[in-house]
Amino acid sequence: MRSPKTAFVLSGLIMLVGVTLTAAGLILLDEAALYTALYTALLIIGIILFISGLYLDNRYVRCPHCDSHLGRVQGSKCPYCGREL
C-alpha cells in the first residue's frame, strides 16, 4: 500500500468489522446455549480482525518520506517532516 490515506481507511474498516463481530458474538453468546460454538467463533474472528486492523494501521499509515507513524491525524503534509503525502 503506497497511500497512507488508503491504509488509514482500510484499517479503520477492518477494525470496525472486528468490533461489530466481537460485540455480536458477546451479545449472542449469552442469549442461547445452542449455538455456543458459532458465537465463540464470531467472537474470535472479530478479535482477530481488530488486531489485523491495528497491525495495518501501525505498519502502513506512515509518511512515505520519513517513515513516521501518522496516527489519526490526516492532512496533506506530514506533521514530522513537512513533506507532501
Image: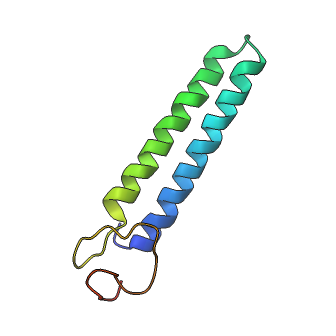
Q: Give the image location of residue 7, x and y in percent.
A: 43, 65
Q: Is residue 35 left or right of residue 71?
A: right
* Depicted 14 relative to depicted 47: above or below: below
Q: Is residue 81 left or right of residue 50?
A: left
Q: Dividing the image into 4 quarters, which one contains the C terminus? A: bottom left
Place residue 40 in its image quadrant. Answer: top right
Q: Give the image location of residue 23, x and y in percent.
A: 66, 36
* Depicted 68 relative to depicted 35: above or below: below
- In the image, farthest residue toward the right: 31
Q: Dividing the image into 4 quarters, which one contains the N terminus? A: bottom left
- In the image, farthest residue toward the top: 34
Q: Please tell me how many numbered marks the rendered image carries.
A: 0
Q: Give the image location of residue 68, x and y in percent.
A: 27, 70
Residue at screen point 69% across, 21% down? 29
* Depicted 23 relative to depicted 63: above or below: above
Residue at screen point 29% across, 88% down? 83
Q: Give the image location of residue 17, x and y in percent.
A: 60, 47
Nearer to me, 9 or 2: 9
Nearer to me, 47 or 38: 47
Q: According to the image, what is the colour scheme of the structure? A: rainbow
Place residue 41 in its image quadrant. Answer: top right
Residue at screen point 34% across, 82% down? 78
* Depicted 3 relative to depicted 51: above or below: below
- In the image, farthest residue toward the front: 80
Q: Is residue 33 left or right of residue 4?
A: right
Residue at screen point 53% across, 51% down? 14
